[in-house]
Amino acid sequence: MTCAACVNRVEKKLNRVEGVSATVNLATGMARIAHPPEVSTDELIATVERAGYTAELPAREPDPDADDGEGDGEGSGAEGSGADGTGGDGSRADRDRLVLTAVLAVPVVVLSMVPALQFDYWQWLCFTLAAPVVVWSSQPFHARALAGLRHATATMDTLVSLGVVASFLWSVYALYFGGAGDPGMRMPFSWLPSAEGGAAHLYLEAAVGVPLFVLAGRHLEARAKHGTGSALRALAELGAKEVELRADGRRIPVSRLRTGQEFMVRPGEKVATDGVVVEGSSALDLSLVTGESTPVEVGPGFPVVGAAVNSGGLLVVRATAVGADTQLARITQLVTDAQAGKARIQRLADAIAGVFVPAIVTVAACVLGFWLGAGADPEAAVTAAVAVLVVACPCALGLATPTAFLAATGRGAQLGVLIKDPGALERLRRVDTAVFDKTGTLTTGRMTVAATTVTPDGPDAATVLRLAAAVEYGSEHPIGRAVAAAARAEHGVATLPEVSGFRAVQGEGVQGTVEGRHVCVRSPRVAVPLPDALASALLKAESAAHTAVVVELDAQPVALLAVGDTLRPSSGAAVTKLKRLGIEPILVTGDGPAAARAVARDLGIATVHASVAPQGKSELVAELRAEGRHVAVIGDGVNDAAALAAADLGIAMGSGTDAAIGAADVTLVREDMAAVVEAVLLTRRTLAVIRANLVWAFGYNVVTVPLAATGWLNPMFAALAMSASSVLVVGNSLRLRTPDRPGGRARGGSRSAAGERDLRRTGVLR
């Protein structure tokens, strides 16, 4: 496919098949097709071929746990042949064609434009050089134009082919019958075609210049489009290629790994697939997968994701997911699906492009007739008609939107923001209200020790946590796990002392003897007074909606631990920036009023809805939308799924449940609320780029076609302008891939230069 008219034709053919719904993307050369089981993929491919194109199913990595067989075909993808020329032998053939065309065409253009270089019989040399350009170099245009003619359709190639053939046939006529073949003939060059008769004029420079510039433009366009999809290719290449099995030490391809098998991950190696750590401890660099800049400490029982880089010790991991079920594969598929989609604004552009080419052919015929009817010289009439054919460009219309979305979804993947479809970008741009879930969204969703307070005359915090963690280690209670984790993380406790006489009392706490001292970790009791320091800490914990536990040594209270769900470090800044971007934050949670108010107070959220059931969340969203608001819901749990689906836009945390992710339009891979701000800024930049592309694409044709029709545009320069228009549109879309500014934040949480300018303009940065 070479232009939006091609897209329009393929879509029409596919959608005429009963039960089929298809969207075709020019930038990716992919079709996204939903079809009933009775319609086979072979029938779909045959339909594309009947439209004058070829197609094949995209290659997919085999799932080792899946049985061979065919699915029902819902959501099938098809990859169509196109003119991107970005891979394999086709790329080399297109490049060779361009180089040879340049070798043949440049002398013709120079001799035609510089009369001082013209010599006897120069025109016949130019004719000899131009003939292979018209026949061989332009063969792809002629072939696709004839294929379109067989199907009663016209595309960009029709315009190019007609322009080349008309210019060449006029030159043949002039050489053999118009006196231009005389030995001493000299041809003055004019930047503008002349309407007056006079010396015989050749248009060989247009006959060779048009294919030269179009081939060059498409080559540059293909390279640019290849760049917009680089993020997706990088995702697909992130995973490890081989893995070392623990059982026998063999190294096998990752594709042969099965769930349940244990494998080794040595320092510096990538984790082969999703799994859980069986032995060893290390720090994993997740920046390649999620954009997280800080390595994550893992140990036995910790889940790990494929493609994470082991930056510490030796790990033994048991595979829990392989092939298409891994997080990396799901991320890649989400981005692929998003790039195959089509926004409303793109459908409008494709519809216009569908009638554009026939309209231009009609205009060219009318221009030819008008000039001849007005008594103009035939060569001037032909020149104007050829210029109209060549300068018109539906390519820019077809590429204006998909290349921007392609670049934006790729950039989003780099930032840890996965966008389900282009429509989500359009809806996110209009959002003015953000409804946040609390637990697991604004907070980590994990119990941690938020504060440790000790008595002035007692042991220090490290000693208290070590002793408390020793008795809590045998407890499965979340508070117990939080205390043990705090001892390891905050104070570097590698091993815990042994406990004797361990006893757990339901609703009270745990106790045991550690290093000869009786240690009790319990909830505060009214009957047992606390020292002033601990009593003050208890009041503070209750006001923050934290759970307080008292640590006693030999029946004496020595410390109070405030345990609770803690805010994500980025939540406060993200809420502040969203408010400055004109988006009102609202907190909705199933937790009680105390916990909800504490979080809202810390984050600066004015509107709070506490103790809200899942159904109540979706009802609240419906009420907000009824007020005319454009609502985004950010959540992570099953209880958020209904609200995510009811909102204008659903944003799910990547660590959330499958139900939440399935109901959302955007998924945040990294557990960082700053990604929400990044997503908003990315959509605003994307829509601005699309608007600029469409203004250029429409404006270019509105200006240049009348210039060509009135004789103010030479066909050769018309071809140059037409080729440049597509390259400019794709190049403008590439700005969305702008690399992060030096000195900015670490990879994954970084801002682009344009994004930072948006932040400063709205007051988010100062």
Image (cartoon, grey):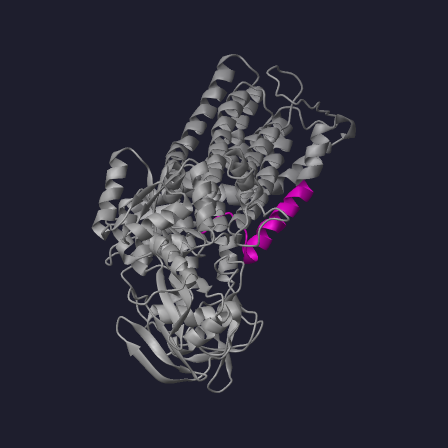
Residue farthest along the top direction in this orientation: 374
Residue at the image position 67 percent from the left and 19 percent from the top: 199
Is 605 rendered above or below residue 453?
A: above
Relative to the observer, which residue lies in front, 526 or 431? 526
Q: Is residue 80 left or right of residue 657?
A: right
Relative to the observer, which residue lies in front, 701 or 92? 701
Place of residue 330 in the rendered image (x, y in percent of width and height, measured from the top left): 40, 60
Relative to the observer, which residue lies in front, 314 or 326? 314
Residue 564 seen from this side: yes
Quadrant location of residue 508?
A: bottom left
Place of residue 442 in the rendered image (x, y in percent of width and height, measured from the top left): 39, 52
Which quarter of the rendered picture does the N terminus lie within? top left
Place of residue 510 in the rendered image (x, y in percent of width and height, measured from the top left): 33, 76
Residue segment shown in magenta: 81-104
Residue 329 seen from this side: no
Query: Which secondary structure dominates the residues rendered in magenta?
Result: helix
Q: Is residue 324 magenta?
A: no
Is 316 rendered above or below residue 425?
A: below
Q: Is residue 96 magenta?
A: yes
Place of residue 720 in the rendered image (x, y in percent of width and height, measured from the top left): 60, 33
Q: Is residue 542 left or right of residue 256?
A: left
Relative to the observer, which residue lies in front, 693 or 117? 693
Quadrant location of residue 190?
A: top right
Residue at the image position 25 percent from the left and 51 percent from the top: 611
Which quarter of the rendered picture does the C terminus lie within? top right
Q: Is residue 529 left or right of residue 451?
A: left
Query: For the image shown, how many numbered marks are present on the structure?
Result: 0
Is 441 rendered above or below residue 221?
A: below
